[in-house]
Amino acid sequence: MAMMHDFSKTALILIGFQNDYFSPKGILYDVVEESSRITGVVENTLSLLTVCAEQFALVVNTPIHFTQNYSELKNPIGILKAIADVGAFKAGSYGAQTIEQLDFFSNVIEVVPGKRGLNAFTHTALAQKLKEHGVTNVILAGTVTSICIDSTARTAVELGFNVTILSDCTSSRTPFEQTFYCEEVFPLYARVCDSKTFIKHWREHG
């Protein structure tokens, strides 16, 4: 956490906080439900926002939206094919909507549209937005840890940002996968800590 003292240059990036993942009515709720329940991803992210939201240089929400026929996906495989097959994250649908718990923070959360794949930087203005606000440090929260969080974090590192991933503000397809990425993969290129440690650090240095 040594490089995270300047919160005026730190952004929180929210990924996948949408009904299809986090509402019991969501199409993909069962995919991340167990991991999300164990990590407490939603509750811990809300607690983090309650304490720190207005101190960040920027809080960004990067929802994923697709057209009705998924025409933007050319021969999708893996999770993107699964999303298309089950009809998740269609623009204008209940499942594509941001979870209502984040409404309370709508005055500090800026939505960056355009995410239609695994990486929140691809086909979006996220990198430009971060640079406009003088951001050098990014914090990642959301789902799915092994896919969207990982790909976004790796790109952030390659773009020159200092990256921290919050282990209890993220969730994956299984508890094992969550633990494996947080303990074995992310430390290879980023910092990993839980939200309580981050908040303690903020109170001491913010």
Image (cartoon, helix red, strand yellow):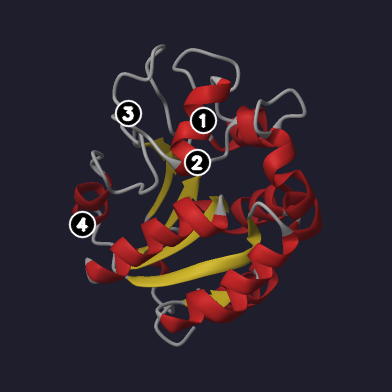
- Residue at mark 3: 73
Q: If you read the primary sequence from the N terminus, does the residue marked by circle 1 or circle 3 appear first?
A: 3
- Give the residue at the far bottom of this rendering: 2
Residues at discs 3 and 4 in contact (Cβ within 8 Å): no
**Residue type, numbered disc 4:** Lys
The x and y percentages for residue 153 are 39, 63
- Which residue lies at the image location 25% right of the left edge and 54% below the top edge? 133
Residues at discs 1 and 3 in contact (Cβ within 8 Å): no
Camera-nearest residue between 28 and 202: 28
- Which residue lies at the image location 23% right of the left edge and 61% below the top edge? 134
Q: If you read the primary sequence from the N terminus, does the residue marked by circle 3 or circle 4 appear first?
A: 3
Badge 4 marks a residue whose secondary structure is helix
- Residue at mark 4: 131
Badge 2 marks a residue whose secondary structure is helix
**Residue type, numbered disc 1:** Ile
Badge 1 marks a residue whose secondary structure is helix
Give how far apart the Cα atoms at labels 2 and 3 are.
12 Å
Camera-nearest residue between 1 and 151: 151
Residues at discs 2 and 3 in contact (Cβ within 8 Å): no
Using the image, determine if residue 24 lies above or below residue 182. Answer: above
Camera-side mark, 3 or 4: 3
Give how far apart the Cα atoms at labels 2 and 4 are.
30 Å
| Res 79 label | 2
